[in-house]
Amino acid sequence: MTYLTRDPIDAAALLAEVAARGHGGISLFVGAVRDHQDGRGVIRLEYSAYEPMAEAECRRIVDEALGRWPVAVALRHRIGELAVGDVAVAVAAGSAHRDEAFAACRYVIEEVKRRVPIWKKEFYADGHVEWVDPTARRPEAPAAALAPGANA
Amino acid sequence: MTYLTRDPIDAAALLAEVAARGHGGISLFVGAVRDHQDGRGVIRLEYSAYEPMAEAECRRIVDEALGRWPVAVALRHRIGELAVGDVAVAVAAGSAHRDEAFAACRYVIEEVKRRVPIWKKEFYADGHVEWVDPTARRPEAPAAALAPGANA
Amino acid sequence: MTSDVSVRVLFFARYAELMGREAVDLMVPAGATVAEVLERVRATLPEAGRLPPRPVCALNLRHVKLDARVAAGDEVALLPPVAGG
Amino acid sequence: MTSDVSVRVLFFARYAELMGREAVDLMVPAGATVAEVLERVRATLPEAGRLPPRPVCALNLRHVKLDARVAAGDEVALLPPVAGG
């Protein structure tokens, strides 16, 4: 696996991956497990994935970023069981200038959250267990919104 | 000194400073010394500062970010002699949600570059030495643009 | 005359729990759409009544619309709302 | 009748090189503006002719407009275009 990992994510290693002598700016985003969600205490969670598609979709997203901006990009998403504070995802984008670095980093994390088939089961302090559905408060997105070409 | 340092900047330490159990997102920006500037090869550079004002201005910028967004912020700017690839500045912003983390991180780095009295002397491969003037291609900003209240 | 082909349908996360399984192999007419594969799933497995009417689907590791057509050996995946990051 | 007060004027980076010094102590009328302090600098030090007509200035560690007024013991700094980050 290139983009998915069952091991802890080392954010500093991602910085090193995109560092280059011509890169003046690196934007790094680190997503960690919060201790709360919608007002409920979270104890731990499990990420699962449609692994071959998640890998392919991550590669497509990274390639899209490389095509749009003159950047180097590193991306890692952890799967398996995570505790509060654990890093779930990290994205690093390095470029000669910070505008491109920020734009590429933001693009990758937004697309990862929107498109990559990874699911999260949260275990709450009150004993409940739930699959997280970020679309639950909005109408369910039609499949067309996720079809190729819809991001242009 | 709190925000200025003559020692190498440890970006991972800044991540740790803003990590908290309620923080799901951390945006980190790392600015490093590029090997080129306007097409010329850069060998090394020296950052100098009006140190007490630079410290005060960094604190004001961080306080502004804390007042605008529910974030934790860490900021470090290196001064003295730096080589290509050395980290010159790092900003980390942690928040419950990534929008705020990105916004605060971006705000801090933009304001640092705009307002903090730090100067950069670049030593080029061709033997030239120059004070970097980011305003050189635009009309010189009037003092009023930097006066208190002008950022609202 | 149309020949039938075998496709594999995958269920993930909450859908796997609703279905009580992670996959099923089905025969469908060659050139059937993903929507027709879903109809065959519903006709074959009663638990499929718990799935949303138009789930997000992938075909061979790519998101597709429901009018995409399948071929022999294709892998169709039903994807609950994703929650990575 | 206005009494004179002492203020310290600081030069940094390229301005320090142009001036050949990093600071000068000057007497100015109490309540003088930063613009008037600059005039006094120009009247006192010929090298000040190399400075821009309206440099960015700070008074006691804060950016100010040129009409800000100084008091005894104040520190006025002339700031070349900054280049941090």
Image: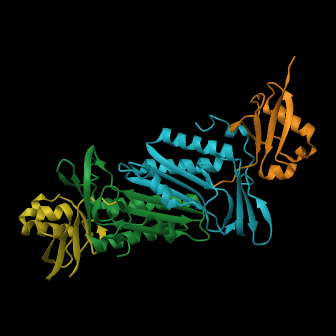
Chain colours: A cyan, B green, C orange, D yellow
In the displayed structure image, the side of residue A22 where residue B71 appears, left or right:
right
In the displayed structure image, the side of residue B24 where residue B41 appears, left or right:
left
Residue B101 in picture, x, y percent from top left: 53, 61
Nearest the viewer among B33 and B64 is B33
Q: Quadrant of residue D53?
A: bottom left
Could you tell me which residue is drawn at 30 percent across and 74 percent down? B52
Identify whether D30 is placed above or below D53: below
Identify whether D53 is placed above or below C28: below
Q: Quadrant of residue D69?
A: bottom left
Nearest the viewer among B97 and B24 is B24
Identify whether B18 is placed above or below C19: below
In the displayed structure image, the side of residue A63 where residue A81 appears, left or right:
right
Could you tell me which residue is drawn at 37 percent across and 52 percent down? A24
Residue B90 visible in image: yes
Residue B136 visible in image: no
- Total numbered circles: 0
Could you tell me which residue is drawn at 27 percent across and 43 percent down? B39
Residue D64 in picture, x, y percent from top left: 29, 68
Quarter of the image for the C terminus of chain A: give it.
top right
Residue A30 in picture, x, y percent from top left: 55, 59
Residue C13 in picture, x, y percent from top left: 77, 52
Nearest the viewer among A11 and A134 is A11
Identify whether A61 is placed above or below D82: above
